[in-house]
Image (cartoon, rainbow, N blue to C red):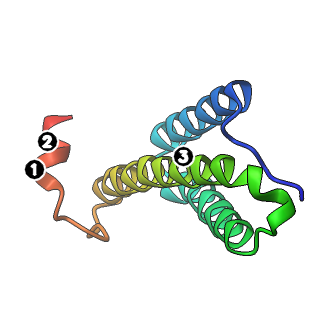
Amino acid sequence: MIIIDITNTLTLLLLLALVVLTIFISHELKKSFIVAIPLFAFLALLVMHVIQLMTLSVQYDYNAATLTWCIVLDFAFIFMTFISYLWVDDLEAKKNNKKSIDNSLEWFWKEI
């Protein structure tokens, strides 16, 4: 069974660097769709890891712990990219003088 193992330290650091770079680029360009790309990628990874965990056969039972940690890390990256998406969307809306998708975190953005 092929698993995209994001629990490996090097892979985790590279993913984190890539996500931070993507957030920085979308912040500088004030384009929220740029940070939405890794958000959908991590959602796809989450679905893939859950399907792999649900269909795990007995002979690959040793991979259950790795898949569980991959799912936890997927959720962490999804949370980080979703908050970043909302932030950059707010910046983009202010730049273009239009209404943001969600203004419920306005108090949070004023603190940043």
Location of residue 19 (image quadrant): top right
Tell me, for residue 110, which label it has, or none. 2
Residue drawn at (71%, 67%) of the image: 48
Q: Position of residue 101 (x, y in %)?
A: 31, 71
Q: Position of residue 102 (x, y in %)?
A: 26, 68
Task: Measure how far apart labels 2 and 3 are at the Cα level.
Answer: 28 Å
Residue drawn at (71%, 32%) of the image: 8
Give amino acid for label 1. Answer: Trp
SS class of the residue under badge 2?
A: helix
Write down the residue under mark 3: 73
SS class of the residue under badge 1?
A: helix
Residue drawn at (14%, 36%) of the image: 111
Q: Look at discs 2 and 3 and give the one toward the viewer.
A: 3
Do the numbered discs 2 and 3 sit on residues whose CB atoms are within 8 Å?
Answer: no
Q: Where is 70 relative to 104, above or below?
A: above
Tell me, for residue 17, which label it has, or none. none
SS class of the residue under badge 3?
A: helix
Do the numbered discs 1 and 2 sit on residues whose CB atoms are within 8 Å?
Answer: yes
Task: Measure how far apart labels 1 and 2 are at the Cα level.
Answer: 5 Å
Q: Position of residue 2 (x, y in %)?
A: 88, 55
Quarter of the image where the N terminus is located = bottom right
Q: Position of residue 86 (x, y in %)?
A: 35, 57
Precedes in sequence: disc 2 or disc 3 = 3
Precedes in sequence: disc 1 or disc 3 = 3
Location of residue 42 (image quadrant): bottom right
Q: Where is 25 relative to 68, above or below?
A: above
Give amino acid for label 2. Answer: Lys
Tell me, for residue 107, which label it has, or none. 1
